């Protein structure tokens, strides 16, 4: 799904104008958001395949929870758990939302709506 969304946004880059970043910014943000969203899932797969073991002697194993905790809740997340589960995943979804709104040119559409609203209500700024 993320690959399809990235392809769709990349395809619509041809309709945008401006600098390189203005044209391809939503595509880059979507690619980055895909990597961030998939990071925790990839960590799980690497842990299951024993490519990145759950516990390492240096403390940077792939374990999501602290070894000393008996419950699996937010208070027991390890550093890797906080980084992958919270930071990467949530920042990925925020970037995806921003990229999607940028691709939809939402700011320009809101300006058009505001102008149309004022046109329909008259040139005065207040509504009786």
Image (tube, rainbow, N blue to C red):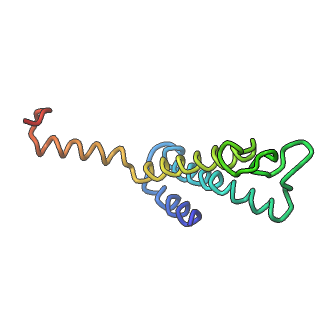
Q: Position of residue 15 (x, y in %)?
A: 42, 56
Nearest the camera: 3 or 57? Answer: 57
Nearest the camera: 73 or 117? Answer: 73
Q: Position of residue 60 (x, y in %)?
A: 84, 45
Q: Position of residue 83 (x, y in %)?
A: 70, 44
Residue 61 vs 123, above or below: the answer is below
Q: Is residue 13 left or right of residue 53?
A: left
Instruction: Tell me what residue is drawn at x 9 percent, y 39 percent.
Output: 122
Q: Is residue 99 left or right of residue 54?
A: left
- Residue closest to the far top: 125
- Residue closest to the far right: 57
Q: Is residue 109 left or right of residue 89?
A: left
Identify the image quadrant of the N terminus: bottom right
Instruction: Tell me what residue is drawn at x 76 percent, y 50 percent.
Output: 70
Q: Is residue 48 left or right of residue 73?
A: right
Instruction: Tell me what residue is drawn at x 55 percent, y 60 percent.
Output: 6
Identify the image quadrant of the C terminus: top left
Residue 67 vs 126, above or below: the answer is below
Nearest the camera: 108 or 37? Answer: 37
């Amino acid at each position: 799904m993320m690959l399809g969304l990235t392809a769709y946004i990349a395809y619509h880059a041809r309709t945008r104008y401006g600098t390189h970043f203005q044209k391809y910014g939503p595509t880059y943000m979507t690619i980055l958001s895909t990597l961030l969203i998939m990071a925790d899932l990839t960590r799980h797969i690497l842990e299951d395949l024993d490519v990145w073991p759950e516990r390492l002697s240096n403390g940077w194993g792939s374990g999501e929870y602290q070894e000393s905790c008996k419950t699996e809740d937010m208070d027991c997340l390890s550093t890797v758990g906080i980084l992958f589960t919270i930071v990467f995943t949530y920042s990925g979804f925020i970037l995806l939302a921003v990229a999607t709104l940028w691709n939809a040119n939402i700011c320009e559409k809101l300006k058009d709506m505001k102008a149309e609203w004022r046109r329909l209500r008259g040139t005065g700024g207040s509504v009786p």
